[in-house]
Structure formats: C-alpha cells, structure tokens
Image: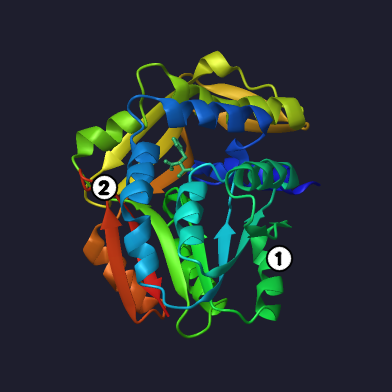
Amino acid sequence: MNQFLKDVIKGLTSDQKTLPSKYFYDEKGSRIFQEIMAAEEYYLPECEVEILQNSSKAILSEISAHELDIVELGAGDGSKTVIFLKEAFKTGKSLTYIPMDISPEILDVNQNLVHAQIPDLLINPIPGDYSVTSELLKERNKPKLILFMGSNIGNFPGEKAVEFIQFVNGLMQEGDFFLMGVDLKKNPHVIRAAYNDKEGVTKRFNLNLLERINRELSGDFDLSAFEHYGVYNPLTGSALSFLVSIKAQTVHISGQEIEFEKFETIHTEISQKYSLKELDKIGSQTGFIWDKHFTDSREFFSLSLFRK
Ligand code: AVI
C-alpha cells in the first residue's frame, strides 16, 4: 500500500476523521496555494515581504561570521528569500545558499530565479526530504544560518512544532542562527477571514484534497456533498480547517468503504498563531540562548531570529 493511501485510510478511520495537510500540495493544490497567496484576505506573504525589505539588514547585522552557509528548509521558489539574499550578498560575506526542498523541479526554479538576480552567489541546492538530507549539512562545518519561512511552522500539529525546532537546533553548532517566519496572534476576525476568503480559493484548496484522493486513490468523493469550514480559536491560537459532510454518505477509496454521518467533519489543517512571548519560551525550551523578533508595521507577522 502506498504511503498516501495508508495515511488517508488511517486518518479517515479515526474517531475524529483527519487528513494530513502535507497532501494538499499536489500540482493542482500548489497552484491553488499560489492563488491563496494572492488573495486579498491572506495577509501573510505581504507581511513577510515587508519585514524582509525593511529588516534584512538589521537581521544580518546580528551575524558576525564572515563565512556563512544560508540553508533554507522547504525553500520553494525562493521569490521572497531572494530579497534577504541580496542584502546578505551586499555585506561582502563569503556565502553559500543551500536551498532544500522535497521537489527538485521547484529547486530548479529557485536556482534560476536567485541566479538571475544575484549571478555571483554560490548556490548548492539539495533536493529531497530534509529530515533525511539534513544529514549532509553535518559534513559542512561553516557557520550556519538556517531559514524556515512562510509560517510553515504553524502547520505542525501541537508538540510537533517544538520537536521540529529541536530537530533544527540539533543541526546547528554553537553560535549558529535560525530565522523562522511566524504568524502572530492578532484580531481574530483578521485570521478567520484569511482562511475563509470571499472568492472561495481556500475552499477549493481544501476540497482539492478529496479530488486528489479521487484521482490518485480511486476514490468516489462527491465534492458537492462536502463544505469547507475554517475557524480560529483565540483560546488556543489555532486556525483549523475542516471538511464537513453535509449528509450521511458512504465513500469508497481503493475498494475500502468509509462511512460519514450527517455533519461529520474531517480535520484537514492547523495553522497555529503565536505570541512573541510564546516564541521566547519555545526558543529557550528548544536549546537557543537568545532570540530577537523582527515584525511588520502592523505586528501581524514575525521573522524571529534565534541563536544557539
Ligand atoms: C503553508 N501554510 C503556511 C499556509 C497557512 O497559512 O497555514 C497554508 C494555508 N492553508 C490555508 N491557507 C493557507
């Protein structure tokens, strides 16, 4: 049984049905995600760009090492990171940019984009699952700055976020830095709207998960019988996405029957929001000795710099 099918069956036979959000990103899902990033209500990318434009210099001034590996986990196309890399290049440090991503295709796009804007920057892309490929980093003993942008940390459920930051800390030597993009707690209305855009792009993104199961795992989900439901809980700081079965129904996936009660939900995603205080606490909990937060003018988002 392939891993996708295993995870889908496991998630849909649990008491609270779930589907792992990592499966959003097939070709179609990745395209819809680009549309989300351009949606009016989805404030995250513009905040991160504002911080990169206004604070890259200040971030770099905290790092004294002259030789530096800038490692980016889940690098994607590099279109935002390049703003930071340009500033880093201007410092005259001897830099190597090491973008890591599961998709070799996106790393090609990344390399072309960065090379076009900074032709003299050394780029050493590493394709593959970074939980495996990060072993390669241990062979390099230059000072490191590890980047993990875009609020991707928010998509790790509960304790997994802390475990991931601990894992990153384990890749680092004393004096190395970690820069993480984090979406901050804010007016709940703003967060709720970001995951319930008027144009219904987020709805399409969520439903594509069922479409993907139909396409790849011989499923027969009737997409018109499921609705997108996005909530934000200010008590926990979690934005949660669900798919709601609007009637009692039976779905088949690779020959297996899955029953849905009327209004039963599938939990598909968590997007955790943090306060700066919580980030300080997480930093010291995960082995960092110092941190500093760089925020946008509305204090919606933080690029948080941690030193080991
Ligand atoms: C990729 N990640 C940070 C996005 C988020 O905001 O959690 C994914 C997303 N899901 C719905 N809209 C955007």
Q: Is residue 75 above or below residue 298?
A: below
**Residue type highlighted by circle 1:** Thr
Q: For the point 35% across and 69% down, which residue is it?
A: 61
Q: For the point 38% across and 43% down, which residue is it?
A: 49
Q: Residue furthest right?
A: 1
Question: What separation in Å lies between label 2 and label 1 (alpha carbons)?
Answer: 33 Å
Q: Residues within 10 Å of mark 1 (few under 14, many from 20)?
A: some
* Quadrant of the rendered image containing residue 4: top right
Which residue does the numbered mark 2 point to in the structure image?
296
In front: label 2 or label 1:
2
Frontmost residue, 264 versus 59: 59
Expressed as whole percent of the image width and height from the top left, the position of residue 92 reads 50, 66
Q: For the point 43% across and 80% down, which residue is it?
A: 308
Residue 24 in sight here: yes
Frontmost residue, 108 versus 42: 108
* Number of marks in the rendered image: 2
Which residue does the numbered mark 1 point to in the structure image?
133
